[in-house]
Image (cartoon, rainbow, N blue to C red):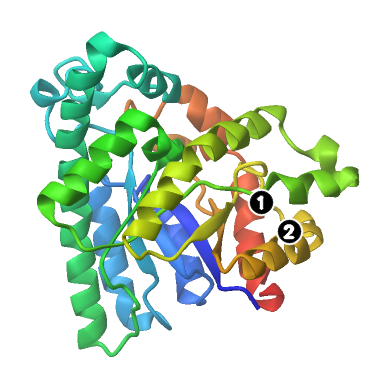
Amino acid sequence: MPNVDIHADDYALTVNTSKDMLSCMKKGQLDSISIVPNMSCFDECMELLYASIPSLPFLPKMSVHLDFVEGRSLAGAEQTPLLTEGENGLMGLSWGGVFLLSYLPWKRRVAKEQLKREIRAQIETVQKAVKHAVELAKEHGIACAQRGVRVDSHQHAHMIPVVWEALTEVIAEERYEVEYIRNSKEMMAAFLLEVSLWKTYRPINFVKNRLLSVYSYRADRYTKAHQMKQMYLWGLIMSGRMDYDRIVRLYPRLAKKAEQDGRTLEILFHPGLTLSEEVSEEIGEEAAADFYLRDDRHVEMEAVGRMRTLT
């Protein structure tokens, strides 16, 4: 059997998102989670987690979910003007905007320095919270396999060249002991071989899969050089609706490939639903309508609840 990691993104995106994820954690359904550092509800959401730790069967591993698209700059607007909009420090970059900064020579150097400031601030914020959570788990005899810093990002932005360079430079400069950086490397062949499912995928997700595949080779080299476990990700082509029915049909191929290649298979879900009253200036209206408010998040929550029978 392959090493499978059932993972959920977006803890601390909103309070209700976090409550939904906590309900999964209390049932022992999640191996790991990602924590959004830069939303105004961060402290409230972390207090919810701290209070729940004594009742958890185990504390999932926790990753920094770097976010340059939403929330507020933790480094401060004056330190990150290319990344923010106005004096209030709202993050203002779209995924495409981050992408362009990698290929505009007259902005790239400045952009990387600002990204480093923001990455450092976001990692430090989450790591302080993670340290406290791990200490609470130890006090209450709750198992936790956390060993070091874990990093991924909203919309996989850390895979984009200028962000990747900024991230790895911060890791080196701060001498972080990193146990995991998500490699957004998804096996397209497994999806293409299941012809009957072709019409159920969003075409744009195939584009994302191919683009991130190009960048994944650099991540492979880095993680191998730093003795990190190699991985495959499952959650790009089906992003937005990781439903159990299709998971059951695709799992044998994906699991077999991961096992053959000696890689961890990280199965990525978004089981937390944002409530309409939680949408604020920190969350883009388009993203909220297209993703955060959709009932598909409860479809993914239902799938998470059934994954243990499959894996």
Q: Residue shown at 48%/36% (left/top)?
A: 276
Q: Residue shown at 58%/30% (left/top)?
A: 290
Type of amino acid under label 2: Ile
How many residues crowd mark 1 within 10 Å: few (<14), some (14–19), many (20+)?
A: many
Q: Is residue 119 above or below residue 68?
A: below
Considering the image in quadrants, where does the N terminus appear? Answer: bottom right
Type of amino acid under label 1: Met
Element marked by disc 1: loop
How many residues crowd mark 2 within 10 Å: few (<14), some (14–19), many (20+)?
A: some
Verify CB contact (< 8 Å) between mark 1 and mark 2. Answer: yes
The circle on residue 242 is: 1
Q: Residue shown at 69%/62% (left/top)?
A: 257
Considering the image in quadrants, where does the C terminus appear? Answer: bottom right
Q: Is residue 268 above or below residue 211?
A: below
In this picture, residue 295 sits left or right of residue 230: right
Q: In this view of the protein, which residue sits in the foreground, 159 or 246?
A: 159
Residue 65: x and y in percent read 35, 48
Q: Quadrant of residue 53?
A: bottom left
Element marked by disc 2: helix
Total marks drawn?
Answer: 2
* Farthest top residue in view: 106
Residue bearing mark 2: 247
Q: Quadrant of residue 63?
A: bottom left
Residue 54: x and y in percent read 31, 82
Gap between marks 1 and 2 measured at Cα = 7 Å
